[in-house]
Amino acid sequence: MSLLRSHQGAVTQGGEMTETWKMARWRGRHWASALVVLLALTLLPLGWVQWQQFKLLSAPTSQPFDAYVHQLGEVDNALARLNDQLQAASRPNAVASPGPLRMHSEALTTQARQLLDLPLPDTPGSPQGPVPALDLLRAFTEASDALLSSAAPNPADALLQLTTMAGALQPALKELAQQVELQKAQWAQHHQQRVQHLALMEALFLALLVVGAAGLVAFLVV
């Protein structure tokens, strides 16, 4: 009888140990699966963040703004030379000679067309709509050839119109240059904010990766 009870107790104890081992194994598998899922959910976003960082850092920085500002300077220089020639031609004792005026007007027209061919740099939140300086430049390029042609009906009136148009261009170009510089500063600030945001996300995912890896190592050791 005692042997039978001892045998039954051993069987019962063995069954309990088997159930405990199965439960531990089941929990271990679930912990391992959870850790693998955690690592996958961490590595995938981390890879995306690093790809975004690569695209952001490899993209051209302020090149569109620099090119536009440079061409604005070329237009402003050509306009200054034309204004000097217009002032000289407007003096009472000036000798009428359309050649220098036509040369400087053509130089300004060439620089203006190059500026008009460039896309105006844009930033989020920048004002939309017509740009007065660009509209004046288009009007100047369309009218200057006719005003300085030999077929102009009244050279004095043509000179006055050209002087008026050139005078209106100066403050408009200055305002446009200030607008582009402001957009450049806004773009640089937006770019820096994106870099900082991606760096913060990368740090967060790296921390999760470290936690997941530490948990997986601890599970394997135990």
Image (spheres, grey):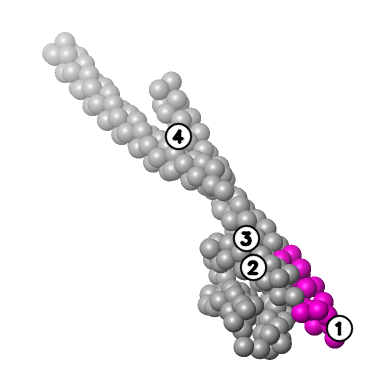
Among numbered discs 1 and 3, the one appearing first in the sequence: 3
Residue ID at (27%, 24%): 21
Disc 2 and disc 1: Cα gap in Å?
Answer: 25 Å
Label 2: few (<14), some (14–19) or many (≥20) C-alpha neighbours in 10 Å: some
Among numbered discs 1 and 4, the one appearing first in the sequence: 1
Q: Residue furthest top?
A: 3
Residue ID at (51%, 41%): 54
**Residue position marked by numbered label 4 in the rendering:** 212
SS class, disc 1: loop
**Residue position marked by numbered label 1 in the rendering:** 93
Q: Which residues are magenta?
A: 77-96
The image quarter in which residue 130 lies? bottom right
Magenta stretch: includes residue 73: no
Question: Does residue 15 appear left or right of residue 66 in this picture?
Answer: left
Q: Position of residue 105 (x, y in %)?
A: 67, 71
**Residue position marked by numbered label 2 in the rendering:** 106
Question: Does residue 27 appear left or right of residue 81 in this picture?
Answer: left
Given contact means CB atoms under 8 Å apart, are the residues at marks 2 and 3 in contact? no
